[in-house]
Image: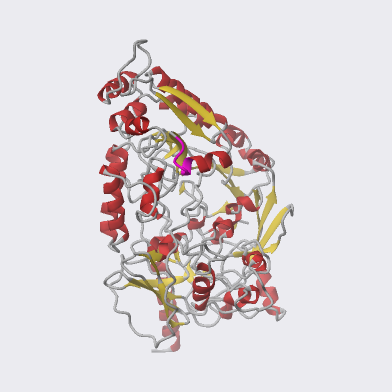
Amino acid sequence: MNRKMWVTLVSVLVILSFVLTACGAPAPTAAPAAPAKAEPTKAPAAEPTKAPAPAPTKAPEPTKAPEAAKAAEPTKAAAAPAPAGKYTEAPMLAELVKAGKLPPVEQRVSADPLVVKALEEIGQYGGTWRRAWKGPADFHAYGRLNYDPILRWPRNPKDPIQPGLASKWEFSPDGKSITLYFRNNLKWSDGKPWTVDDIIFWWEDIELNTELTRAPHAEWVVNGKPMTLKKIDDYTIQMNFDGPNGLVERMLAFHGNQWPLNFERFGAFAPAHYLKQFHPKYNKDVKDFKLFNEKADDLNPERPAMTPWTVKTYKPGDPKLIAERNPYYWKVDEKGQQLPYIDQVELSLVENNDAIAAKALGCEIDMQFRSMDLRKFPLFKENEKKCDYRLFRWASASGTNLALWPNQSYAEDPVLRDIFQNKDFRIALSHAIDRKKINAIAYLDQGVIRSTMVVPDSTFYVPEVENIYTDYDPKKAAEYLDKAGLKLGPDGKTRLRPDGKPLEVTIETERTGSDLDALQLITENWNAVGVKTALKSMTRDAYWPRATGNQVQISVWGTDRALEPFVDPVYIFPFDERSWMAPAFGVWYKTGGKDGVKPTGKLAEVQGMFDQFKATIDPKKQVELGKQMVKTATEEVWTIQTVGMSPVPVIVKNNFRNVPEKFTQDWIIMSPGTLDPSHFFFKK
């Protein structure tokens, strides 16, 4: 074969490999696009029960083919290693190479980079992406742009988990081990090698250190025993568990990020070469972990990262956070251009959501949906032409924006607890709610009236329970109250409890504004059918400990995480103290029966189903179990849903490209992280 034919053949094979390895485009939302609150509410993570210390990490062994049955076949990601000169880079980096301040791009990009398929078109280098945030407590305004975990959520929620830093992975046949194969020649943003030693450092010196982590997080614990790690080589590691771990794939996509994810305190690797100098175990001059935590933080400009941008300039109180492109980033586009396209990200500090809206209306936002208030949608629309942007409406993965939970483990009044445990009573409350009026009052008629916690884009969606018990029908509500044995009293207006006392319930909430108006309407609706209802509003600081402490009769929150409900299934069944349909039952489940109250009936059955879900690595079995749990929870009305899937406004400058018009966003998938912000660009 002559040289010309050989070069042609290699070129064809390289292009073909890019096509095969690229990620899929997002699917259109399956339900009407309808705005909700700018960001779904997120409940604080629960601390898992402390587990015994694991065995130390095993010493490296020669690489060998693992005895493993592969899980659901993941999308392949890595292109074949490219010959010298294949990759190109941003002009600002080319100048640094020319000046001798950076090595050539071929030495900086991974030997098998992740190839990002363009949503619209191949991009162009340059520009500063302007956004707004409310400071470190609003960390996700920055952090979600840098979604780069070990495995990745797919762009299309119904697709399988995708490769990330790991290019492939395998389960053992018994599901007790997962072997992760990482991309060769990965580098931190400071140019130092990334290896599985960074996972071992996180596990042994952060996750198992009780001064940094109270106890290993639940995803790393099976049968009460933490995982153990086995290093195979610098880019291959095996995670071993006491039993099958059916959650580990999902958790490597959700929590497989660089530790600590700011205040979240989740992760699966950390820069050992940088952080060891601040760790008392490795530096005898360091006596506590105060400095370590400061240096590990995602907003520390000195800390190396594996993300498209790293913080260049920031200290608390600064009017702006500036993040700059990572010269060692490990992703490329289909032409071999190193990502990201955009040079810098600039976040301007503002006080509140109104100030963020003002930034958008002042033409100072390039692309953002976080904290964009739906009530400002008409104003945003008026300014489209003036500010040269498109205004999208992304559906929220929110089963409902306003959910109510009659507390089935309420201990202060056993008679009321028995009433809350009566399915007919819960159905009656649902039929008594005028959801159409709520949609108009709170969500500009943009929400969807629905009864289930999962949205249509989810793999676990069950269409037949989408709208059960949602009709506003006071007469039907009265019939169900009769079936529940709650007869009208002598006044003909108030229902009586079995002990003869008037039926009185209290809703507690931390909601304000239009949500509080909607709750006032629900209060009126329930009073109208004879359930005397009071509404108490308080600060979140006062509300949260009462709700998690099993002290609230009827709690209020939203049901987000509706694409992937089983990474944290607090809304499906009593999972822990945040499961407000029965917090004490959730504590019993969380602690393995050591604390709390043991549930019975359907609640106990679904807890058992989740145990089966966790114990299988068969995706089809998990979907089957997941759908059954969703169906049961909806039919039993453990959660009274109102209006969900209300959209968020998305401001996108007309020259800001590779952003889809339709998308379902959720904090669980770190939106817009799954859209690969590294390939967003300014079209010239």
Residue 152, visible in the rendered structure:
no
Above or below, 332 against 541 in this view is: below
Q: Residue at coordinates 48% horizontally, 60% vertically from top-left?
A: 118
Above or below, 257 against 636 in this view is: below
What percent of the width, then of the height, locates residue 239? Answer: 39, 73
The answer to if 551 sits in the magenta stretch is yes
Residue 494, visible in the rendered structure:
yes
Instruction: State the quadrant of the N terminus.
Output: bottom left
The answer to which quarter of the image holds residue 525 is: top left
What percent of the width, then of the height, locates residue 288? Answer: 65, 69
Instruction: State the quadrant of the C terminus.
Output: bottom right
The answer to which quarter of the image holds residue 428 is: top left
Is residue 141 rendered to the left or right of residue 203?
right
What percent of the width, then of the height, locates residue 9? Answer: 40, 80
Query: Which portion, as a residue range, is magenta?
Result: 547-552
Is residue 231 rendered to the left or right of residue 105?
left
What percent of the width, then of the height, locates residue 647? Answer: 49, 39
The chief SS type of the magenta part is loop
Q: In terms of depth relative to the viewer, which is nearer, 254 or 650?
A: 254
Is residue 18 rendered to the left or right of residue 509?
left
Q: In terms of depth relative to the viewer, which is nearer, 672 or 89?
A: 672
